[in-house]
Image (tube, rainbow, N blue to C red):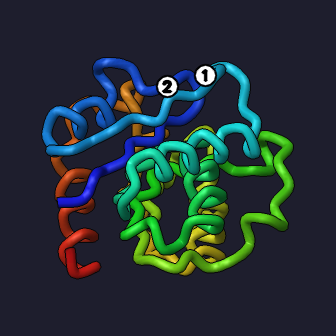
Amino acid sequence: MATTLIVPGLRNSGPSHWQTWFEAQLPDTRRVEQADWEVTCLSDWAARVREEIDAIGEAVWIVAHSFGCLASVTAAFVRPKQVLGALLVAPADPHRFGEPTALLEEKLAFPSLVVASSNDPWVKASAAQFWAGQWGSDYLNIGEAGHINVDSGHGPWPQGLALFEQLRKTAGA
């Protein structure tokens, strides 16, 4: 079974976050560590994701949240054959972080699913759906689920794990 790379967003994902819960549920997971969890810089964050992909040395699955989605997508454009698929949850709106969007506007070379919420305070559902379309990702709005993090009640997240398992199954893993 391939390694699952957990890519948190701003401020990392704490011990109660669903990404941390995923790590406990899934075998062979690794978490990307950023140099500074308080400062977002897409090029720096994407470089850390690429370094982890390279260090693993085999194709990986990506499970990303928020700004980690942007970092993962950016890294995956450079390492398309090294990613089997990606679950991209509550992707950050690059405009909100002052990041250039031109480098994000292409299709991913692997199956992906963008999961969004209708009341996410960090990204409008329409923006998440737009990025899903740019990346060629499937899109799922799970309703009023906030930023799909601990603050919105998403510690253990069995629905998310089921979505990830379905993605892996449909991708032929």
Provide residue 85's location: percent of width, then percent of height. 38, 68
Residue pictured at 79% horizontal, 65% vertical: 103
Q: Position of residue 123 (x, y in %)?
A: 63, 48
The answer to whether residue 24 is above or below residue 111 is above
Instruction: Left or right? Give the position of 20 relative to 72.
Output: left
Kindly identify the amino acid type of the residue bearing the numbered disc 1. Trp
The CA distance from mark 1 to mark 2 is 6 Å
Q: Residue, x 78% and y 40% (percent of image)?
A: 97
Q: Which disc, if any, is residue 71?
A: none
Q: In this rendering, would 106 be left or right of 5?
A: right
What residue is pinned by disc 1? 37
Residue located beneath label 2 in the image: 12
The residue nearer to you, when weighing 58 against 74, is 58
Disc 2 marks which amino acid?
A: Asn
Q: Residues within 10 Å of mark 2 (few under 14, many from 20)?
A: many
Q: Is 8 in front, or is 141?
A: 8
On the image, the x and y values in percent for residue 79 come to: 56, 65
Q: Could you tell me if the residues under marks 1 and 2 are in contact, i.e. CB atoms within 8 Å? A: yes
